[in-house]
Image: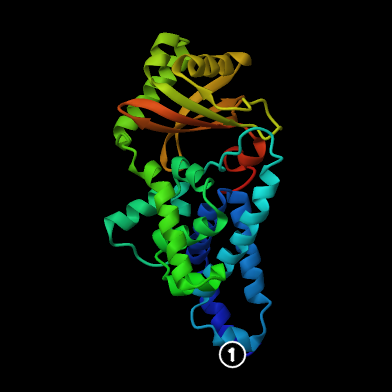
Amino acid sequence: MTDAVRRRVWILDDTAPAERRTLLGLAYRMLGSAHDAEDVVQEAYSRWYTMAEQERREIKSPIAWLSKVTSRICLDHLTSARVRREHYVGEWIPEPLRDHGAWTSAAGPVDDPADQMMLQESVSMGMLTVLETITPAERVVFVLHDVFGMPFTEIAEVAGRSPAACRQLAVSARRRLSGERARPADDVERHREVISAFRQACESGDIDALVATLDHGVVVHSDGGGKAHAALRPVVGAQKAARLFLGLLRKQPGMELSEEDVNGRPGAVIRRGGVTVVVIATETRAEVLTRVWMVVNPDKLHAWTGQGTG
């Protein structure tokens, strides 16, 4: 290895933790899976280290190169994932994050509060589930431009389209996401109060108190992936949702519900014998839960069971 390449690799390795967090956050927002994000980032790094010496020396910014490669891999992955999810058992919910702070890094300093808010919001379960409804190209362009601030001229290299076409994809994505992002939500402290009341009602078995924490039209999504018992379709309505929660906690002895942040927002976790079996992400409005996502697929709970990172 020449001194020039050795210096280049050293520069990449010296900043690897921060760069890797940025790339993981980029990939997670595009894929909705921490596990897949880690695989994609590993593939991007593999391509870097297997490049010819001369090619490496010509790359001025390794992190910019890695970001583009990661994004291209994600675009291919998203296209094939659409086909795979047609055979998924029940609803597919993004993988819940435990330590969301490790996934909200930007490529550089973020001084604008609005940009910082976008970084945080873009890993919320509400935003991630809506990102699932747009096309792979729209999702990649939106994440690169609106979340990470990459110019359309560079995004065009990733998407294989003109800058003008990428700009149009971003406009289309914003239009489809605007309804979700415009929805008012309670502040974090108020959200925590709702979760606390929800937990207490679940533990006491008081169905009326539990219903009081739920919006009349609350929607509960469940993801078992065919590997754990879960509702195959959304459960709608406060009474039905309350019976679902109480039934889940009563089904087996030793089930414990605790309050924990999920994807950076107040949520809850259900453990049995100290092992996480359900992760619950929530969304509130007017001091009641409006949407609930229950992830019970064990393949998506590794970060919560000590079997993986994320």
Horizontal and vertical percent for residue 57?
A: 57, 87
Residue 82, position in %: x, y? Answer: 64, 49
**Residue type indicated by callout 1:** Asp
254 vs 303: above or below: above
Query: Which x, y percent locates residue 301?
Result: 61, 39
The image quadrant that residue 197 belongs to is top left
Using the rendered view, name the quadrant where residue 108 is placed: bottom left
Q: Quadrant of the N terminus?
A: bottom right
> Callout 1: helix, strand or loop?
helix
Which colouring convention does the figure follow? rainbow
**Rendered residue at 48%/27% (across/down):** 219
The residue wearing badge 1 is 3
| Residue 159 visible from this viewpoint | yes
Residue depicted at x 50% and y 48%: 131
From the viewer's perspective, is residue 58 above or below residue 149? below
Pick whichever, 230 or 90, lies toward us.
Answer: 90
Q: Residues within 10 Å of mark 1 (few under 14, many from 20)?
A: few
Residue 287 position (above or below residue 182): above
Query: Measured along the vertical axis of the image, is residue 215 above or below residue 133?
Result: above
**Place of residue 224 in the rendered image (x, y in percent of width and height, measured from the top left):** 65, 32
